[in-house]
Image: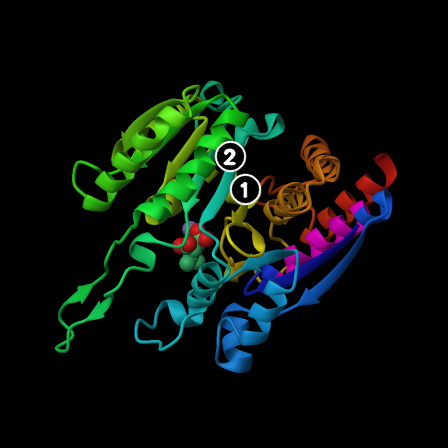
Amino acid sequence: MNLKIAVLPGDGIGPEIIDQALKVIDAVCEKTGHSAEYTQALTGATAIFETGNPYPEETHTACMNSDAVLFGAIGDPHFDNDPKAKVRPEKGLLEMRQRLGLFANIRPVTTFPSLLHKSPLKKELVEGADFVAIRELTGGIYFGRPQGRSEDGNTAYDTCVYHRFEIERIAKLAFEFAMKRRKKLTLVDKANVLATSRLWRETVQEMAPSFPEVELDYMFVDNAAMQLIQWPKKFDVMVTENMFGDILTDEASVITGSLGLLPSASIGIHTSVFEPIHGSYPQAAGKNIANPIATVLSAALMFEYAFKLNNEAEMIRKAVEASLEQGIVTEDIDKTRAVSTSTLGDWLASHIKMNF
Ligand code: IPM
Ligand code: MN
């Protein structure tokens, strides 16, 4: 199979971690007879500096013409402390999500036995935790209009908007995920306060009879934030709106021991995008110290979701597990015996070539 992949390294550590994922993809292709055809494209601050636009038209075309997009990270401190910046790198990511119709962001949270000691939570709470957070990605307060400032500059507003069809399509996906797993779905909302949340609850309630085997429960987001760290094992599939999902998945990521480990898949109408959940970690850019595992595991999700190549995805996951078990890790995992980003990428690629 020829795998047409658009590669968007983005900012900060993006290029370094993407390089490792490409090594791993190439190793899988070498072993399995597939070929990968990469189209590199600009996004984020890097794209702003070169073209003035964080999501240039050529980048969109490259994404539309590919079977999958592998995305590094976006964000640059240059813009963070300038609230008046006219254009920001994050806008590129949001525009990509919107134009590719990526309404569902899937963030699987699994723990690695060899890393249980890295979790800030007690081992017995974390051991065996395994859930999927499904975050709505193209609606809610991120995109609702109006958004802005009053003329005198003293008032600012964001608007949270959801339409029934947006809730239905992501809830359907969440029910289907639950059916393939332990058949438990938790809707996280703030229905005691927000009108949008009440529409979520009503819509999901109406859909529930079509999935009689799924045990459905509801949780307010503040309570969910607490339960997630108190009983992470309680969750199977969690579905929630855009901003709640953003916050809860960062929280969920620390359960596993490092933000550098969690991959994600964004799927929807056009080409799917695979990206680590962490940011661009500008302090580490160019230092060859960042953890590439989240990106490598995002490539595994790409094989699974975009190409339906489950064995290939499994090869990558096994290689990652082997590296963790053997202590071939970057400094976020083990400061005293860390290997570099590129050494870890090389190790994973050669592990795949030699062992499968
Ligand atoms: C994420 C990020 C983005 C988001 C930012 C960079 C716009 O935090 O993918 O979770 O808030 O969605
Ligand atoms: Mn986030």
Residue 258: x and y in percent read 52, 40
Residue drawn where x is 55% and y is 30% of the image: 111
The main secondary structure of the magenta stretch is helix
Count of marks overlaid on the render? 2
Residue drawn where x is 20% and y is 63% of the image: 157
Magenta range is 15-28
Judging from the image, what secondary structure is the residue with disc 2 in?
strand
Q: Residues within 10 Å of mark 1 (few under 14, many from 20)?
A: many
Residue 161's image quarter? bottom left
Residue drawn where x is 61% and y is 39% of the image: 334
Most foreground residue, 112 or 171:
171
**Relative to 75, does residue 135 appear above or below in the rendering?**
above
Quadrant of the rendered image holding ligand 1 = bottom left
Answer yes or no: is residue 251 visible.
no
Residue 295: x and y in percent read 61, 49
Q: Residues within 10 Å of mark 2 (few under 14, many from 20)?
A: many
Most foreground residue, 263 or 11:
263
Determine which residue is flagged by label 2: 109
Residue drawn where x is 60% and y is 43% of the image: 335
Residue 204: x and y in percent read 32, 34
At label 2, the amino acid type is: Val
* Residue 25 left/right relative to 237: right
User: How far, Cα to Cα, is label 1 from label 2?
Assistant: 7 Å
Whether 22 is among the magenta residues is yes
Answer yes or no: is residue 146 visible.
yes
Judging from the image, what secondary structure is the residue with disc 1 in?
loop
At label 1, the amino acid type is: Leu
* Residue 160 left/right relative to 44: left
Determine which residue is flagged by label 1: 262
Please say if the residues under marks 1 and 2 sit with CB atoms less than 8 Å apart: yes
